[in-house]
Image (cartoon, helix red, strand yellow):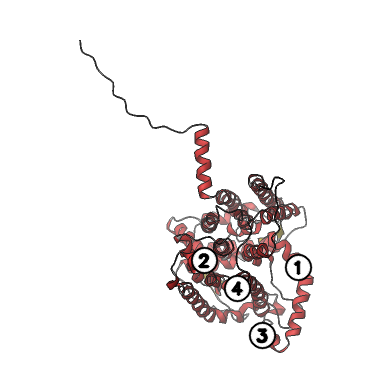
Amino acid sequence: MSSTTAVTEPVEDVPTGPKKTQRITSGVARVGVAAVAFAILATVFGGIFAVATPPFWGHDEITQFGRAYQVAHGGILPLKIKDDRGVAYGGTVPQTIDSVMGYAMRDYVNNPQEPAPMVASEKHYDQLLDKPLTENHHVVWFTNTAAYSPVPYIPAAIGIRVATVLNLDVGNLLLLTRLAGLVAYVGVVFFGLRALRDSRVQWLAFTVALLPIAVFQAGTITADTLTNALAIMVSALLVKALFLGKDLSRPESAALLASAIVLPLCKPTYVLLAMLVVVVPIARYGLPARFRLVPWAFAGVGGVLFLIWTKISSPTTAGMGLMRKPSQWHSVVPGDQLRGILTNPIGFIDVFGDSVMRRDQEWFTEFFGELGFAYINVPATSIVACLLALAIAVGTAEQMVATHRRTAIVAVVIAATVAMIYVTLYLSFSPVDFYIIDGVQGRYFVPLAILFFAALLRWMPLRLQAPTGQLNMRGPAIAIVVATLISLLCAVWKYNVVVYG
């Protein structure tokens, strides 16, 4: 009588229940709790804004798309176009896209009284968006965005090219272009937050990156999407290296150095922010002392490219007046404005002061969110929730260890960048002898927020503390996430109520 022996393969231990939860928790901790929470919230709410925002209702989204489409098809330099009104730059887009642009502009300019929805006809939008791209192209004006280099439009250009290859209709092309920018925003900011995963200050970066205005812009087509993402990443890496005194990993060092070249080409206003790479001690880059000139080399290349592109794009300022009402088309003269500043600096300071007194409440609200060209301010609930999250994040951050000299340099750079924002808009957008500096918007200060608070924290040692003396971040982190979630939910809710009724 024979017998057989069954041979069984070892069964892999599949984690279940508490073990699986523990493994997920440890994985999240390795990546960074704030980074993971950011990725989830930014993807969800950025996606909602990408879908819910009517086509071309984002900030300058008509001209932003025009420039992105030009870049997607190899257009690098500003292209002068014929315009009977004056100097103009632009390019071409498919006729079916131009039709959506024209309808969208008429729709968000001509608004009914409340409580009627701002959108005149969702059905008409659907009809326009269902059409295919046409071979026939129309010339469109985008002088204001022609001044930007191609760099901040790379994500959008990729989305446009992919949509074209897939032969998508107009609506899906616009959606894919928006989502391409959102992916870039989430990816770049996630990298910066991950660098701070072992620090409590990660929640400050988290809160700034998820301000309703930042998420809204991430979900629409604009050069600010990549600009904001890079500025937040740079700020996070500078906080780690300068203010926390921690060494950067090789990828982090490479990213920070590369940003000295890329960020000035995204938006020239933030060129000084990128130059802060030279303030970081060379040891923080993981490089020996003999390589101390490497950051200077990257900053030098970035500075030179910034100057080259400024020279290339400078003629576009002659056409910026066309963004204003017809009576002011030829009133924006940068040369005259500059002479006015140099010959009468006291007068310029007086105009600046008047601008602050007349408009600072608008800039404050816009810092949290004025959503696109519907000009919908986020509700007060969103602003209060953001302020609560910021207060907790600032109050629970570590003590900063940057030297007073380096902190002062950062503070000066922030102040100088703020000044550049005002001066740039005074020269290139405000009519000669105008009573205020026109065109300033609160969202322009979002890229500076993290470093502003970091410098403030260095000089303000007060922190929140638990009664036991030991600070457990579990409670504060939950409060920050919940407050941020509330701010985004209310922003989306109000946007939907006002736009769609």
- The span from disc 1 to disc 2 (Cα, nearest Å) is 30 Å
Sooner in the amino-acid sequence: mark 1 or mark 2 = 2
Which amino acid is tagged 1? Asp
The residue carrying pointer 1 sits among few (fewer than 14), some (14 to 19) or many (20 or more) residues within 10 Å by Cα, namely some
Quick one: 147 or 185, which is closer to the camera? 185
Which residue bears the numbered disc 2? 153
Disc 1 is placed on an element classified as: helix
Q: Which mark is residue 338?
A: 3
Disc 3 is placed on an element classified as: helix
Quick one: 438 or 346, which is closer to the camera? 346
**Compared to 259, does 334 lie above or below?**
below
Quick one: 286 or 11, which is closer to the camera? 286
Which residue bears the numbered disc 1? 360
The residue carrying pointer 2 sits among few (fewer than 14), some (14 to 19) or many (20 or more) residues within 10 Å by Cα, namely many
Give the image quarter of residue 83. bottom right
Give the image quarter of residue 10. top left
Q: Which of the two discs, 3 and 2, sits closer to the camera? A: 3
How far from the left and from the top, in percent, is residue 41? 59, 49
Taking the image as shown, residue 341 lies to the left or right of residue 166, namely right
CB atoms at circles 1 and 2 under 8 Å apart?
no
- The span from disc 3 to disc 1 (Cα, nearest Å) is 24 Å
Which amino acid is tagged 3? Leu
